[in-house]
Amino acid sequence: MGTYVYFFPTVGAGGGNDIQWCFSQVKGAVDDDVAEADIISTVEFNHSGELLATGDKGGRVVIFQQEQENKIQSHSRGEYNVYSTFQSHEPEFDYLKSLEIEEKINKIRWLPQKNAAQFLLSTNDKTIKLWKISERDKRPEGYNLKEEDGRYRDPTTVTTLRVPVFRPMDLMVEASPRRIFANAHTYHINSISINSDYETYLSADDLRINLWHLEITDRSFNIVDIKPANMEELTEVITAAEFHPNSCNTFVYSSSKGTIRLCDMRASALCDRHSKLFEEPEDPSNRSFFSEIISSISDVKFSHSGRYMMTRDYLSVKIWDLNMENRPVETYQVHEYLRSKLCSLYENDCIFDKFECCWNGSDSVVMTGSYNNFFRMFDRNTKRDITLEASRENNKPRTVLKPRKVCASGKRKKDEISVDSLDFNKKILHTAWHPKENIIAVATTNNLYIFQDKVN
Amino acid sequence: MSADVPEAASAEEQKEMEDKVTSPEKAEEAKLKARYPHLGQKPGGSDFLRKRLQKGQKYFDSGDYNMAKAKMKNKQLPTAAPDKTEVTGDHIPTPQDLPQRKPSLVASKLAG
């Protein structure tokens, strides 16, 4: 059950060859005054990498399409241009609790393409929607009873008959909501994940995970419920969940206490008892007020191979081998210098920022965001890491990005930036890596950057 | 006064100083506790989590508001504390408290 996809790494992707990243494009407004609605809340490539979707706080989805590669211009891969944009979710009210439901898009997940149309799931805090995006490039002309502008002809004036034909027209891309999956979550949805059977998907909120069938909107199965009988006893919440890429019976969910539970749906209908519990032992003498907060996992992602999973907590990225529960196999420090700033990061709430992480197509490099519009990549094979910046200052296409360095303490070298100069309002929470090529999408607060590796 | 007390205190102080030197995290914790001495022991405890679960703008409920007005009569309606951090059961939002909420009718600037 489920398909096995084999990825052929392109030249330069991991395996020791250091990639040189170049600026390709930037989307969004230039001005510093950011409207709340324009804050990007999710970024996702589709399975072929041809389409790139973004969701924002205003409930809107924008889809970019990669233009076909021009064989003559071999110096760069195709650019991403706007393909479709639509309002996915609107603000709503829960009248019973007098609470407003935000229209912010928390996650977008693409379905694999089955026919000419594209499908994606988008979700806000409470409602998941299945959107169909289809192209129309021809229209019927030559009706007998209608004029071209749609007005009806007087039938008595019709003297001959003709067969209407399809004629080409300017491409129109239409988005329509095909399914609305509502009223299944009391708490706020943080994740959606499509099963490898391509028929079902899960949605997770702070305390529960539900299983849906893509065709059925009026019911879903609860598969995980960690709500305690007495809410006073609540000690942890679900922070992220994902289906295994190949095993349709397996999924994982992460918690605010830094644990990951792997569940097997064959074991029982309600997967409250995990099959595996992944947790790194902590030295109790190192425990501080901040320990639990910074151990909270903000994202969990399976590798494409399905052998590993990656978790992101506040300061690090960890790679886990599914066969080993007691500790991660690799740990990468994203911004360790922040450990001595935790007090102020707690006061300004930055300590609760939820960073995401992603794998490259061959699972050899992982990427995650940081502050000051910096983002980090870790090569698992060479063990080298790099810090880059998403900034309009490096605007020229094919300009290789200069690595950045943060000076934690002591004398600041030239071109280094000191920890105290970092802009904590410029956070990169969402990044995405093309499934096959070295093309990455990096979201700053309200801009989307696209970087590519240097070709030739 | 027992002679043991000053010794015990200095041993504890010494451990605290060691902690600060070896662990930046503990130093930060000390800083935080100095600024907010009433901060609870368990940050991951239920108060913190319950606040997280309750995220969402509390909106004006005219029923609640008018009931409260009727009950209170001459007294002041309970209003939010200036810092408005806690969603308490007593606070009834007044129309003046609430920011304007409009759905976005404008296209995303990413598509511009």
Image (cartoon, rainbow, N blue to C red):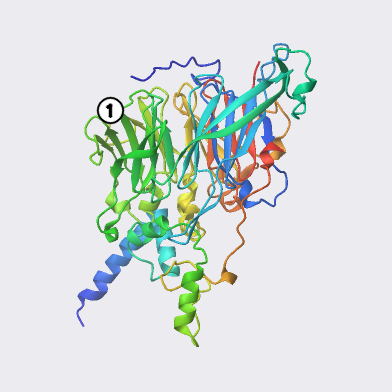
| Number of callouts | 1
* Coordinates of residue A244 in the picture (x, y in percent): 36, 28
* Residue located 39% across and 17% down the image: A4
Q: Which residue is mark 1?
A: A323
Residue B60 appears left or right of A293 = right
Query: On the picture, is A129 further left or further right than B8?
Result: right
Q: Residues within 10 Å of mark 1 (few under 14, many from 20)?
A: few
Name the one closer to the observer, B17 or B56: B56
Q: Where on the picture, by quarter, is residue B34?
A: bottom left
Q: Amino acid at mark 1?
A: Asn
Point out residue A411 in the picture as x, y percentages from the top left corner. Answer: 58, 48
Residue B19 percent location from the top left of the image:
35, 57
Could you tell me if residue A287 is visible in this image?
A: yes
Image side of residue A298 versus residue A146, left or right: left
Which one is nearer the viewer's eye here, A355 or A187?
A187
Question: Is residue A412 shown to the viewer in this render?
Answer: no
